[in-house]
C-alpha cells in the first residue's frame, strides 16, 4: 500500500489542509494499491499565492538562466525514468510497450524548448514601436490520467521557457506518478514557488484554479466537456486558455495504398495506449471496393493483438483505467451492435482469463456509417470503426464530418497526392504514411478538439503577453 499525503508548495512538501482520501486502484485486478490525501481550495489558494510571489522575480530571469533551469529539470526527470515506467504500468495500466516509448520522449520536451529559446525573438521592432513578448503570469496546468507525465512535463517546459510560474493539478487518478514528478521537480532545485503541485478533484482544485484571479492562464488537457466548462468560467477573469481536448481522428487509406502494410499499422495505431489516446486513429476510412480485403487483413491483425497484463512486454492492450471507463466502452460496443454496424472481431465482455481487471476485447466494427454513434463520439477504448467510402472526395467529406479536429492520418503510394488530401482535412496535425512525433511541431485541435497550440515556438507564444511601446 502506498500513501501519498503531501503536496508541493513553495519549494516544500507540505501536508494538505484537505482531508478527503481517494483510493488508488490497480486496473489490472481492481485491488487497492494506495491512497492519496486530496488537496482542497485552501491548498490551491496557497499554491497560487506562492506562484504569484515567485513570478515577480522569475519573470525577470534571463534566457540563459531559463536554459539552465530546463537542463536541470530534464536531468532530474530523466533520472526517474524507471520509476515512471513502473508506476504508470501499475497505476493506470499503461502497457510496458507504450509507457517505455512515451518515457523515451520526456527529455525532448526540455531539449526542444532550450532550442526554441536560443532563437526566439522576445523583442521585435515595428516601425517606431518596440514590441516585447513578456511572460503571461501564473499558469494553471490541468492534466488527464491517460498522459499525465508527458502533459505535465511538456507544459512545465514551455512555462519555464516563457518565464511563467505554475500550479499543476494532475488527475487524482495519477497520484503515484505525480509523487515521482514532485520529487524530481524538487531535485531540480528551481527557485521556490516556481513549480507547485496540488493533487485534488477537478470540481475542487480545478474550480479554484479556473476562478481565482491570481491565475492568468490555464493550460488544460482533457475531455472536451470539461474543457468547455473551464473556458466558460475562465472568461470571468479573462484568463488565457490553451485547451487540448478529445478526438475522433480519421485514418484515410487511399486506393493506391499497400494494404498489407497500411491496415496492420492502422489497427495497432487505433489501439495505442490501449485505445485511450486522444490522437488514436479510430475511424479507418477505406475504399468500398477494397472493403473485403481490408476486413480480412484487419481481422487477422486483431487475432495477433495481445490483450493482457500491462507489465508483460508483449502486451498490446492493457486494462481500461477504471471500472467506469470499462463500462463506458462496453456501452459503446453495445450501441454499435444495436445501430447495425458489423462486428468483425471482439465485442462485449472480458477476454478469457482476465475477468478480474478492466480488460476489453480488441474490437473492430466494419461497414460503419459515419453518422453512427460509434463513429461520432470518442470511445477511449480499443474499438476501431472501418468506414467505407466511394471516392476520394467522399473520404475527405467523411473525415471532416466530426465535431473534432485533433489529428488525421493519410496513407498513399503517392506522397504528393496524400499531401493534397491533407490540405483538405480540418485537423491540427495530419500524418502521412505513418505516425510521427516531433516536439518542435505545433500540436492542437481544430473545432471541438481545442483552442491554441502546444510545442515548439507556436506553443511558447501563448505563454507570452504582447506589449507594444511606441515612442
Ligand atoms: P477529464 O476532462 O475528465 O479530466 C482532465 C483533468 O481535468 C483532470 O485533472 C480532472 O480532475 C480535471 N477536471 C475535471 N473537472 C474539472 C473542472 N470542473 N474544473 C477544472 N478541472 C477539472 O479527462 P480525463 O478523463 O482525465 O482524460 C481523458 C480525456 O482527455 C479524453 O477526452 C482525451 O481525448 C483527452 N486528452 C486530450 C489530449 C490532447 O492533447 N488533445 C491528450 C490526452 C488526453
Image: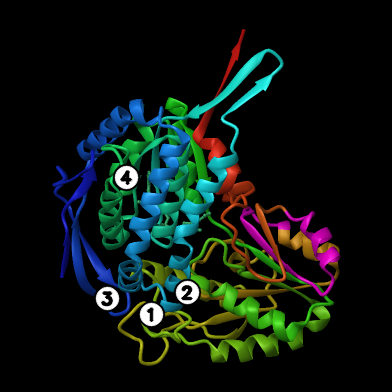
Q: Residue at x 57, y 47 (%)?
A: 456
Residue 68 point in image, percent of width and height: 40, 44
Residue 279 point in image, percent of width and height: 57, 62
Q: Residue at x 20, y 58 (%)?
A: 36
Q: CA distance from mark 3 to mark 1?
A: 14 Å
Please state the extent of the stretch shown in magenta in the rendering: 400-425
Foreground residue among 381 and 76: 76
Q: Label 3 near label 4: C-beta < 8 Å?
A: no
Residue that badge 4 annotates: 203
**Quadrant of the image occupied by residue 435:** bottom right
Residue 60 point in image, percent of width and height: 41, 27
**Is residue 338 in view from this perspective?**
no
Q: In terms of sequence position, does the residue under pointer 3 or pointer 1 come before the other? A: 3
Q: CA distance from mark 2 to mark 4?
A: 27 Å
Mark 4 vs ligand 1: CB under 8 Å?
yes
Q: Is 58 on the left or on the right of 102, as rendered?
A: left
Q: Residue at x 46, y 78 (%)?
A: 97
Q: In terms of sequence position, does the residue under pointer 4 or pointer 1 come before the other? A: 4
Q: In terms of sequence position, does the residue under pointer 4 or pointer 3 come before the other? A: 3
**Which residue extends farthest top?**
471
Which SS class for mark 1? loop
Q: Label 1 near label 3: C-beta < 8 Å?
A: no
Residue that badge 1 annotates: 310
Crowdedness near tag 3: few (<14), some (14–19) or many (≥20) residues, C-alpha within 10 Å: some
Q: In terms of sequence position, does the residue under pointer 2 or pointer 1 come before the other? A: 2
Residue that badge 2 annotates: 274
Closer to the eye: label 2 or 3: 2
**Quadrant of the image occupied by residue 160:** top left
Amino acid at each position: 500500500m502506498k500513501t501519498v499525503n503531501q503536496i508541493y508548495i513553495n519549494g516544500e512538501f507540505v501536508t494538505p489542509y484537505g482531508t478527503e482520501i481517494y483510493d488508488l486502484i490497480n486496473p489490472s485486478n481492481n485491488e487497492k494499491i494506495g491512497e492519496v490525501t486530496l488537496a482542497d481550495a485552501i491548498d490551491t489558494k496557497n499554491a497560487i499565492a506562492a506562484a504569484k510571489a515567485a513570478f515577480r522575480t522569475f519573470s525577470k530571469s534571463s534566457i540563459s538562466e531559463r536554459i539552465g533551469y530546463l537542463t536541470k529539470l530534464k536531468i532530474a526527470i530523466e533520472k526517474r525514468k524507471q520509476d515512471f515506467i513502473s508506476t504508470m504500468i501499475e497505476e493506470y495500466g499503461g502497457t510496458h510497450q507504450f509507457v517505455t516509448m512515451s518515457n523515451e520522449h520526456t527529455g525532448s520536451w526540455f531539449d526542444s524548448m532550450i532550442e526554441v529559446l536560443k532563437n526566439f525573438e522576445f523583442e521585435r521592432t515595428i516601425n517606431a514601436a518596440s514590441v516585447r513578448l513578456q511572460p503571461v503570469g501564473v499558469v494553471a496546468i490541468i492534466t488527464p490520467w491517460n498522459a499525465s507525465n508527458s502533459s505535465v512535463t511538456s507544459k512545465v517546459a514551455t512555462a519555464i521557457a516563457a518565464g511563467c510560474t505554475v500550479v499543476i493539478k494532475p488527475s487524482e487518478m495519477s497520484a503515484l506518478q505525480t509523487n515521482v514528478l514532485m520529487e524530481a521537480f524538487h531535485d531540480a532545485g528551481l527557485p521556490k514557488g516556481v513549480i507547485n503541485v496540488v493533487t485534488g478533484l477537478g470540481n475542487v482544485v480545478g474550480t479554484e484554479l479556473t476562478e481565482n484571479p491570481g491565475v492568468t492562464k490555464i493550460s488544460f488537457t482533457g475531455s472536451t466537456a470539461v474543457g468547455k466548462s473551464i473556458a466558460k468560467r475562465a472568461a470571468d477573469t479573462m484568463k488565457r486558455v490553451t485547451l487540448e481536448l478529445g478526438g475522433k481522428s480519421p485514418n484515410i487509406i487511399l486506393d493506391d495504398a499497400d494494404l498489407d502494410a497500411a491496415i496492420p499499422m492502422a489497427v495497432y495505431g487505433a489501439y495505442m495506449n490501449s485505445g485511450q489516446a486522444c490522437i488514436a486513429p479510430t475511424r479507418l476510412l477505406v475504399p468500398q471496393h477494397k472493403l473485403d480485403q481490408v476486413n480480412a487483413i484487419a481481422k487477422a491483425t486483431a487475432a495477433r493483438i495481445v490483450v493482457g497484463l500491462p507489465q508483460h512486454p508483449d502486451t498490446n492492450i492493457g486494462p481500461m483505467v477504471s471500472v467506469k471507463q470499462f463500462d463506458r466502452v462496453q456501452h459503446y460496443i453495445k450501441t454499435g451492435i444495436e445501430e447495425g454496424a458489423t462486428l468483425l472481431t471482439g465485442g462485449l465482455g472480458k477476454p478469457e482469463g482476465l475477468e478480474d481487471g478492466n480488460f476489453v476485447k480488441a474490437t473492430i466494427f466494419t461497414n460503419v456509417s459515419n453518422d453512427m454513434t460509434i463513429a461520432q463520439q470518442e470511445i477511449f477504448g480499443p474499438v476501431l470503426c472501418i468506414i467505407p467510402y466511394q471516392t476520394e472526395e467522399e473520404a475527405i467529406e467523411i473525415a471532416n464530418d466530426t465535431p473534432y479536429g485533433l489529428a488525421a492520418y493519410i496513407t498513399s503510394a503517392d506522397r504528393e497526392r496524400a499531401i493534397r488530401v491533407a490540405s483538405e482535412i480540418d485537423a491540427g496535425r495530419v500524418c502521412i504514411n505513418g505516425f510521427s512525433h516531433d516536439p518542435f511541431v505545433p500540436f492542437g485541435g481544430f473545432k471541438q478538439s481545442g483552442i491554441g497550440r502546444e510545442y515548439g515556438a507556436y506553443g511558447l507564444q501563448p505563454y507570452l503577453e504582447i506589449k507594444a511601446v511606441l515612442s
